[in-house]
Image: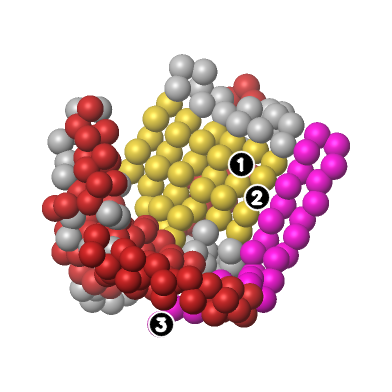
Amino acid sequence: MKRPPMLMHVKIRGERRGFGLWLPLFLVLPLALALFIIMLPLLLIAIPVFWPRGWRKRALHIFGAAFEIFNSMRGLKIAVQGDHHYIYIFLPYKR
Amino acid sequence: MDENKKRVLEMLAQNKISTDEAYRLLSALESEDSTSEGTAKSGTAARIKSKYLRVCIMPGPEHEHDGKGDRVNVRVPMSLIRAGMKFTSLLPPEARDKVNGALHEKGIDFDMRNLNPEDMDEFLEALSALEVDVAGSDGETVKVFVE
């Protein structure tokens, strides 16, 4: 199983000021789990409602697929530089 | 150090090639080295080797050193593309029909319902040979390749 990204490096620079941040994504996972547990009753209500419409499979698989996408983001790098701004997002592969 | 690698670094130092081009040349040389060492590579191994889809947009030569002009450098892991393509199978049929309709309007005759895991693997494998190099009228360049 792929390991989820642990950190995200974000750098934003404007014309005068800029900042860089190392975001600890490993702290997001417990928060997401807590949110999932809070939302679980709503999900349990939603599944029978959408059951006849054929959304059952999707509702059950969407969380797994979203988690897989999140896990696959290791190594993603986006750097955009304009005349007056610079945006950089990087999810390190090794950490 | 390998003579070819040294030559690439010299070209970079002399500003004859950009950092991206130098990186690609060095990567190509490294892959050549590993092939010549006689490592038998299966199709799967070769597929694993191409790890990232790169999109680079560079401004024209007049903005090469002054820091002006838009520059984009995106590196997308192939695993993310794979996961994203799997995600399309969860699209509701109505949404898929809308996407198919929009593609058809643009003249692309492609049905998303026909996209299966085998096709995806074949598609991603074929991507490893992809190389798009576009030069605009103002000198800006767009490069899409897999590394």
Q: Are marks 2 and 3 in contact (CB under 8 Å)?
A: no
- The mark found on residue A88 in the picture is 2
The range drawn in magenta is: A1-28
- The mark found on residue A80 in the picture is 1
Circle count? 3
For label 1, the SS is strand
For label 2, the SS is strand
| Type of the residue with mark 2 | Tyr
- In depth, the one of A10 and B86 nearer the eye is B86
Q: Residue at x 53, y 72 (%)?
A: A39
- In depth, the one of B117 and B145 nearer the eye is B117
For label 3, the SS is loop
Distance Cα–Cα, label 2 vs label 3: 28 Å
Distance Cα–Cα, label 3 vs label 1: 31 Å
Q: Is residue A78 magenta?
A: no
Q: Residue at x 49, y 41 (%)?
A: B56
- The mark found on residue A1 in the picture is 3
Q: Residue at x 72, y 65 (%)?
A: A22
Q: Are marks 2 and 3 on the same chain?
A: yes
